Image (tube, grey):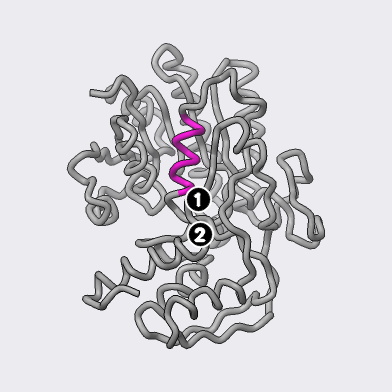
Amino acid sequence: MSSSTVLVTGGTGFIGSYVAADLLDHGYDVVAYDLSTDPRILEKLDIADDVEIRRGDVTDPTDFVRAVRETGTTHVVHLAALLTNSAQSNPRGAMQVNIEGTNNVFEAARTLSDQVDRVAWASSAAAYAPPAKYGDRFVTEDDLVSPDTLYGATKAYNEHQARVYREEFGVSDVALRPTVAYGPYRETGGSAFLANIVEKPALGEPFSVEYGDQVIDWQHVRDIAQAFRLAAFTPEDDLTQRVYNVRGELATIREAAETVERIVPDADLTVSDEGELPWTQRLDMTPAQEDMGYEPAYGLERGFRDYINVLREERGLDPV
């Protein structure tokens, strides 16, 4: 039995399931706290039997405190949120889940301060402005935060409330600003093209994609999972800040398409340069590397090949 129990909000979702798998691999006990108790992704990762799944809603403060207390949670990884498109179509829901829900997490850590050692939580690169605001340079955590989306605005606000809980109430927290995760079992959403550029060709289907000349941070979900574990367990004395950029490999959409075509030579991909991405992808992650030892394990070639072969195996196709 591990001496640390990590409660992962959104723990049956895409990133949450991989976070659970990474934590289990490192010897921690895991509670997946989520409105959905569907274990589909946990089962695909072969860990459903090793995770305690607890149905709950982060917008219910009493339920959340009870869950933390009853499970003996020592660390929280807070991922539950309404993402970009959902937030845009349901602004009030976004405020309730993303802001009030996050407040409930911090409140639980304050109330149960003798039990909870750290809250690692998902801010987002969406807190930054569109790429044109920064030019071609890499942005640091001290750069202009000027979100163009409601989702990004909720994340920027949460960074402020986290600081207050840290400075006024002694709650230990670490926020990460990842971009968008890709990898097997990703749910479609506002950035579905990131999945489809790999998934469609892997299964022999054509696909057209925009943003061809724009740089994307291709961050494999297993690398994001690693980052959240490090954020939860890096000792206080090693942290020089509380908000960290994390990223994977930078490549344009066109370069990503070319990588897919090398792996799947008969891929039918059409790339255009239409559209503009809503936030910058060029994140300087030096502090995360130096303070937490974060190093992405998945470059584009490895990440895409791994992703494609999982999909092909599920369809009974030969690996590439």
* Residue located 48% across and 47% down the image: 224
Q: Quick check: 209 above or below 189?
A: below
Give the CA separation, mark 2 to mark 1: 9 Å
Mark 2–mark 1 CB contact (< 8 Å): yes
* Residue located 31% across and 19% down the image: 3
Q: In the drawing, does residue 157 fall left or right of residue 61? A: right
Q: Which mark is residue 93?
A: 1
Which of the marked residues, 2 or 1, is nearer the chain's N terminus? 2
Q: Which mark is residue 39?
A: none
Q: Amino acid at mark 2?
A: Ser
Q: In the drawing, does residue 98 fall left or right of residue 210? A: left
Q: Where is residue 319 drawn, in percent x and y?
A: 30, 73
According to the image, label 2 marks what residue? 86
Q: Which residues are magenta?
A: 223-232
Q: In the drawing, does residue 144 fall left or right of residue 164? A: right
Characterize the local packing of mark 1: few (<14), some (14-19) or many (20 or more) Cα atoms within 10 angstroms.
some
Q: Where is residue 23 drawn, in percent x and y?
A: 35, 36
* Residue located 23% across and 46% down the image: 47
What main secondary structure does the magenta stretch of the protein show? Answer: helix
